[in-house]
Image (tube, rainbow, N blue to C red):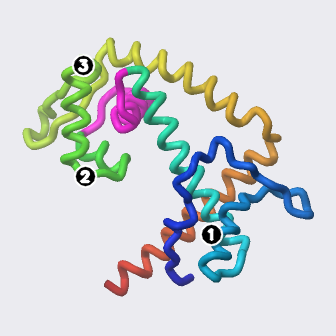
Amino acid sequence: MCPVNMSPLTLKTDHDHTELQADLDGYLFDPRIREVLARQGRNVEPGTEALAAVRILGKKLHVTMERWAERFGLSEGRFQILVRLKHQPTGRFAMGELAEMLDVSPRTVTGLVDNLERDGLVKRVDDPADRRSVYAELTDQGRERIETLWRETAGVQAALTQGLKESELIQLRHLCLRLIQAMSVEEGKTHATS
């Protein structure tokens, strides 16, 4: 797999109003992606189109999630911390664990927890067994907020996927996870040669 710059294939236009088309087999495609490829003198390949579609979807999901979280006075990162804490039976995680789970730096988690703590949604708790370790713990107010958000999230997810059959959703999950596996293999190769 050779590295390909996918940036030109995401297009900075509004994807809400994309005039998608169907190919001869009835599968959707974005004619703008094909236009960009043609302008670059590249062949239209299913892998390139698929990765461009995944990238567009990822960006759109991220922006949608940010806007949604903002309605509740949160950023996506702060929302993700609250979700992690909600699903932890103790309602707490070590700060370092949160950074690993979110795949961000410890410094980033510190900033996110600072904001959550300021808003009364999370509190810091020292680990009595290890003075160097600090936990982020969900407060009662934080638990109430995330429960409200979680109920609404479930409704939004249901609305987004209602037009897909269960078998399509399973296939979508499977294909996304296979792409993640392939990316991990490629990252491993890159790290092994650097």
- Examine the rendered structure and indicate whether residue 133 appears above or below residue 146: below
Give the farthest residue toward the right: 24
Q: Mark 1: give few (<14), some (14-19) or many (20+) Cα within 10 Å.
A: some
What separation in Å lies between label 2 and label 3 (alpha carbons)?
22 Å
Give the farthest residue toward the left: 131
Q: Amino acid at mark 2?
A: Ser
What separation in Å lies between label 2 and label 1 (alpha carbons)?
35 Å
Q: Amino acid at mark 1?
A: Val
Q: Residue at x 43, y 22 (%)?
A: 71
Q: Which residue is mark 2?
A: 105
Secondary structure beneath dot 1 equals helix
Q: Which residue is mark 3?
A: 119
**Magenta residues (range):** 73-94
Give me the disc on residue 36: 1
Q: Residue at x 81, y 46 (%)?
A: 167
Secondary structure beneath dot 2 equals loop
Q: Mark 3: give few (<14), some (14-19) or many (20+) Cα within 10 Å.
A: some
Residue 149: x and y in percent read 48, 21
State which tag comes first along the sequence, 1 or 3. Answer: 1
